[in-house]
Image (spheres, helix red, strand yellow):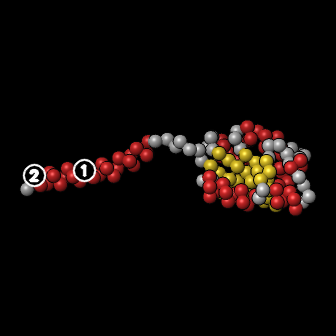
Amino acid sequence: MGNTIAKLLSTTMALFSLVLAPLSHAAVKPDAEPIKVVYHINDASRASALLKNVENHLRAAPGSKIAVVAHGKGIDFMLNNAQDANGNPYNVIMETLAQQGVEFKICNNTLKSRNLTAADVAYPAVVVPSGVAEIARLQAKEGYVYLKP
């Protein structure tokens, strides 16, 4: 009987080690992939708060991959000569964030509906065919999580 119990314990321990070994390895393995986040804006009155959120996000989680996608009334802060309520140009903070890897994307459908072109867009923003389609693509195809401050 003692031999049967010993075999049972040995088999049980072997099974536990097969199940738990991958979990213990995963617990100590650092994330190789950065967190990817898409910030959605469709109201430029929220632009200053959004940009502050992005700054705070990068401070708390350096190396995060962030895209800011604007459409509708949200594009206004990405246009040439756009300024916040204090007269500070938005493109300055956008350029600073872009140097940290943040991408700014602006909806071409919105530009067209407002008779604007890519020439009206401030650097570093790039034009995408559709803001909402870009948000969906980033989430579905590239694994971005969605935030709308």
Towards the viewer: 24 or 86? 24
Residue type pointed to by label 1: Met
For the N terminus, which image quadrant? bottom left
**Residue 100 vertical placement versus 108 (above, below):** above
Q: In the drawing, what numbered circle is on residue 3? A: 2
Residue type pointed to by label 2: Asn
Residue 126, x across and y down, in percent:
79, 48
Please give the name of the residue rendered at 29% of the width and 52% of the height, measured from the top-left corner.
Answer: 16
Label 1 vs label 2: CA separation? 15 Å
Please give the name of the residue rendered at 86% of the width and 49% of the height, measured from the top-left corner.
Answer: 118
Q: How many other residues sit within 10 Å of disc 1, few (<14), some (14-19) or many (≥20)?
A: few
Q: Can residue 10 be seen in this view?
A: yes
Q: How many other residues sit within 10 Å of disc 2, few (<14), some (14-19) or many (≥20)?
A: few
Given contact means CB atoms under 8 Å apart, are the residues at marks 1 and 2 in contact?
A: no
Please give the name of the residue rendered at 12% of the width and 55% of the height, measured from the top-left corner.
Answer: 4
Residue 125, x across and y down, in percent:
79, 47
Residue 87, x across and y down, in percent:
89, 46
For the C terminus, which image quadrant? bottom right
Classify mark 1: helix, strand or loop: helix
- Please report whichever mark, 1 or 2, sits nearer to the chain's N-terminal start: 2
Q: In the drawing, what numbered circle is on residue 125? A: none
Q: In the drawing, what numbered circle is on residue 13? A: 1
Residue 52, x across and y down, in percent:
74, 47
Please give the name of the residue rendered at 76% of the width and 58% of the height, measured from the top-left corner.
Answer: 131
